[in-house]
Amino acid sequence: MGFSQQFYNYLEWLEKAFVIYCCQRYDMQGKSVLKTQAKFYLADACLKYCMMGFNPESVAAMLENVMYFELKRRGYEVYIGKNETKEIDFVGVRRDERIYI
């Protein structure tokens, strides 16, 4: 088993343990979910602080983490939007509603 496969196995185990959550990338032009370039969000931000300490520059990443879980809590399917070379932080889909953040 190569390093790459072992790495993806670890990510899968962390997902199954509800330590991280995967957010798939959505291609805005092709209107499809991409199989690569997903982002992962920590279920508990304290895990990051325990391992790496607090860094004021990481506040934006933690706010992104909070926003992901707030959209999930409100019942949205959450994706990261991709439009050519630009990225949309979040695309929230719920029934016929679609929001872009």
Image (cartoon, helix red, strand yellow):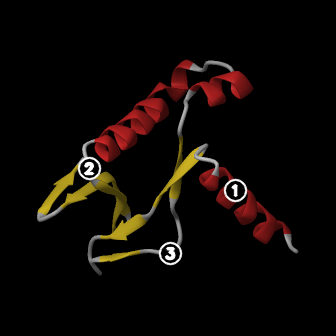
The percent coordinates of residue 97 (x first, y second) are 12, 59
The percent coordinates of residue 33 (x first, y second) are 38, 74
Residue visible at 88% across and 74% down? 1
Density class for disc 3 (Cα within 10 Å; few <14, some 14-19, many ≥20) is few
Density class for disc 2 (Cα within 10 Å; few <14, some 14-19, many ≥20) is few
Alpha carbon distance from label 2 to label 1: 24 Å
Name of the residue lying farthest toward the left: 96
Residue type marked 2: Gly
72 relative position to 35: left or right:
left
Residue type marked 3: Lys
Q: Do the residues labelled 1 and 3 touch (CB within 8 Å)?
A: no
Name of the residue lying farthest toward the front: 17
The percent coordinates of residue 29 (x first, y second) are 26, 77
Residue that mark 2 sits on: 75
Residue that mark 1 sits on: 13
Q: What element carries label 1?
A: helix
